[in-house]
Image: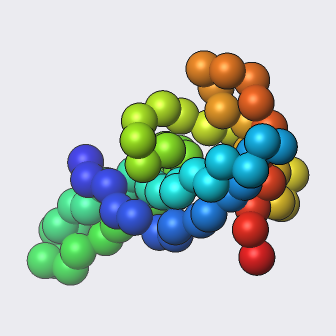
């Protein structure tokens, strides 16, 4: 199993703090009997660059799991 970065986001809290967010996707790769490589994408997760996890709360909002704070994506 592996993982890859699929996106990076910036978000802002109500107090003006800017957060850097990394979106990561897990995957598995296997060689088939005929020698071809096949990849299956697995779970996606969001991580704060300083440590910690987030939940999606719509298209432009995230919840910091450890604090419950809602932060909004900066366009």
Examine the rendered structure and indicate whether residue 67 appears above or below residue 59: above
Is residue 40 visible in the rendered image? The answer is no
Left or right of 61 on screen, residue 1: left
At x 17% / y 67%, what residue is drawn?
Answer: 31
Residue 36 quadrant: bottom left
x, y percent for residue 37: 23, 74
Residue 10 position within the rendered picture, expressed as x and y whole percent measured from the top left:
62, 63
**How many numbered discs, if any?**
0
Looking at the picture, how far across and down is residue 26, in whole percent?
39, 51
Q: Is residue 41 above or below residue 49?
A: below
x, y percent for residue 6: 47, 69
Residue at point 59%, 65% (across, down): 9
**Residue sitting nearer the eye, 32 or 21:** 21
**Given the current orientation, which residue lies at the most extreme front position?**
15
Q: Quadrant of residue 51?
A: top left
Image quarter where the C terminus lies is bottom right
Res 73 seen here: yes
Identify which residue, 30 or 25, lies in the foreground: 25
Q: In percent of the image, x 49 and y 44: which residue is there?
A: 47
Q: Is residue 13 above or below residue 35?
A: above
Indicate the quadrant where residue 62 lies: top right
Q: How is the image coloured?
A: rainbow
> Quick check: 58 left or right of 48?
right
**In the displayed structure, would residue 33 be above or below residue 1?**
below
């Amino acid at each position: 199993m592996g993982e890859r970065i699929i996106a990076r986001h910036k978000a802002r809290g109500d107090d003006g703090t800017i957060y850097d967010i990394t979106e990561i996707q897990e995957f598995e790769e296997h060689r088939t009997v005929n020698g071809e490589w096949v990849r299956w994408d697995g779970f996606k997760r969001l991580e704060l660059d300083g440590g910690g996890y987030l939940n999606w709360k719509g298209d432009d909002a995230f919840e910091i799991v450890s604090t419950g704070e809602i932060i909004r994506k900066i366009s």
